[in-house]
Amino acid sequence: MYSFNGTLTRNSEIAKLKQTIAMYESEDPHAAFRADCNRKVKLANSRQEKAETNWRKALETAKNLQSRLSQSLRENRKLSEQLRTIGMKRESAERKAANLQELLSRRGQKIEELQAHNNELKKVIADKDRQLREKQDTIDELRAMVRHLEDKINRDGTDSGTPTSQTPRNKKKVIPNLRPTTGNHKGGQPGHAKSEMPAFDPEQATDTTTHELKEDEKKCSVCGGDLIDTGRYEEHQEVDFKIVRTYHRHLYKIYQCANCGTQVKVPVDARHTAKNQYGSNTRDLILSLAVSENVPINKIRQFLCGLFDGRFVPCEGYIAKQIKRAAKDLQNFKEDLRNEMLKKDLLYWDDTVIFVNTKRACLRFYGDDRIAYYTAHEKKNLDGVREDGILSELNESQKVMHDHYTGNYNREFRFRNVECNQHLERDAQRNTNDTGHTWSADLKDLIGKTIHDRNKAKREGSTSFPPERIRQFNASLDQCLAKGDKEHAELYKKVRNMKGADYGYAFEGALLNRLRKYRRNYFHWIEDFSIPTTNSLSERSLRGVKSKMKVSGQFESVEYAQYYATLRSYVETCRRNGWNEMNALKRLTDGNPVTVKELFHGTESG
C-alpha cells in the first residue's frame, strides 16, 4: 500500500480547523469569522476531494504500474531463463563449433591429401591417356595399313592394272569389255547366217576315201530286201595337215678348164654356208615360236626334236643365233618404220617391266592400229625415251596417248598429251574402295556414260558433242570435284593425327590434284571425237610381252631383249597390215624382208 504524507497533513489541519470552528460556534463571537472559516473548510474539503480523487488515480496508476512491473519481472525472469537457455545452447554450439572446426581442420588436411593424391592421379591419367592416344594412333595406323593391304590384295582389273589372270580367288573375274551391252544371249542370233567352213575344190583333194557298207549290212531296214549301189554319195570334206620332212641336197657343180686344168666351183648361196644345216622353213618356225608364241628356247628345241623324229636336234645356241641374225637383218626396216611413224597425227605409247638377268628392265611400245614399234632398255626412265628418238621428233600438232607418264610433260617435248580415261576410271574405283567416298563413283559413272554417248554419236556421224552437252559435262565434272574436296576435308579430320597412315587419304588428294592439273589432257576427247578415250591399243600390244615373261621369266641380256623387240615390231606390223605371219618370216629368212614401202605405199599382200 502506497501513502502520501502531504494528504495526511492536510487532514490533520482540517480536523484542527473543525475543532476551532466548533469552539467558535459554541462561543459564536464572531459569525463572520465562522463564515470565513466555513468557506475555507469547504475550500479545503473541495481540495481534499480533489486530492482524494488524485490519490485514487495515483493509487490506480500505481496499481497498474505494480501490475506492469510484476509482468515485467515475470517477463524478465522468462527472458533470464531464456538467456540462460540460450547461453547454454550457445556454449553447446560453441563446443560443437569447436568440434566442427577441429573436424573441418582434419577434413581440410584430408582434402589436401586427397587433392595431392588426385593431382598425382591426374598426372597418371594424363600419361595413360597419352599412351592410349599413341596406342590408338598405332591401332588406326595398323588398321589403315591392313585395309590398304587388303585393298591391294583384292584389287582386280576394275580398280588397277591387275591382269584378269591374277584376280584374287575370292573375287569374280571381270573381263574388260567396252562394247555396249545388247542384252542378247551369246552365240548366233536369230536370222544370222550360220558360219561354216568353206568347201575346197575337189581338184585340190590329196586323198579320197569311199565309205561302204559291209556285205552283211546291205539289207533294207524296212523290208529286209537287198541294197544296190546307186552310184551317188554324200560328200564330207576334211582339211588337215601332216608334217613332211624334206631332205634337200644342194649340189654346186665343179668345172675344170680344158686347157690348164683349173677347177671352178659354182658360188655357194649365202644361205648354205655350212655343210649341213636347217632350211628356211625351220628358221621361220623358230622365229614364229620365239616371237609370236613366246615359246622358250629350250621348248623350241624339244618341239623341233619331235618334228625331226629325234634324228636332227638343233642346239639352243643355234636357235638363239637365228633370233640375233634375223633381228640384225631388220635394222633398215625398223629405221624406215620409225620414220613412217613420225608422220602420224596420233601415237599410242606405253611401256612395261621386263626382267633381264634377274634385274628389272623396260620394254616400250609406240604405234597405232597399223604400226607396232618396240624398243628395250636397261632402265625405265626418260633417258630411254630420249634414246628412242621418237617423242622428241614430234611437233605441236601431233598427239600422244599415254597412261599419265609425267615425263611426257617435259619441256623438251612439243607434242600434245592425251591421258587414258580407262586408267582414270580404275583410279576412281580404287578411291571408292579405299575411302568409301561417292564423288569418285560419280566421276566414274560420268565418264562411262559420256563415253557411251560419244560412241553412239560417232556411229551417227558426229565429230563432237554440241556446246550445250560440253557445258553440261564440265558442270557435272565441277560438281564431282567440289564434292571430292568436301569429302577429302572430312577425311582429313579423321586422319590428321594418324601420322599419314591412311593411304586412301594421300591417294585421294593426289587424284584430285591430278584431275585439276591435267583436266584438258584427260577430257579433250569431249570436244574432238578423233581423240581416243583410252590407251587400250598400247596395253593390248604389250600383253604378249607379259605372256613372254610368264613363260620365259626373263631375257638373257638387254641386247637379246632388243632383238625380241625388233622381231616383234616386224611381225606385228606385218600382221596389222594384212600380211600372213609365216609369209613375212619366209621373206625375212630368205634375205628379202617385207619393206615399209610395201606395207604402207605398195599393193603387194602376203
Image (tube, rainbow, N blue to C red):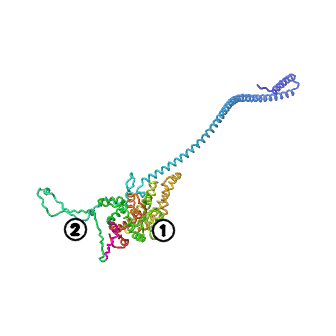
492 above or below 395? above
Apparent side of residue 71 relative to residue 489 in the rendered image (left or right): right
Q: Which residue is mark 1?
A: 413
Residue 223 placed where, x, y %? Answer: 11, 56
Q: Nearer the viewer, residue 200 or 323?
A: 323
* Amino acid bearing label 2: Glu
Q: Quadrant of the N terminus?
A: top right
* Amino acid bearing label 1: Phe
Callout 1: SS: loop
Callout 2: SS: helix
Asked if residue 272 lies in the magenta stretch, the reply is yes
Q: Residue furthest left?
A: 225
Q: Which residues are magenta?
A: 260-275
Please rate how many residues cluster around mark 1, counting C-alpha atoms within 10 Å: few if below 14, some from 14 to 19, many from 20: some
Q: Residue furthest front?
A: 260
Please rate how many residues cluster around mark 2, counting C-alpha atoms within 10 Å: few if below 14, some from 14 to 19, many from 20: few
Q: Which residue is mark 2?
A: 203
Residue 73 visible (yes or no): yes
Apparent side of residue 55 relative to residue 505 in the rendered image (left or right): right
Q: Residue furthest right?
A: 29
Q: Quadrant of the C terminus?
A: bottom left
Q: Are marks 2 and 1 in contact (CB under 8 Å)?
A: no
Residue 492 placed where, x, y %? Answer: 51, 54
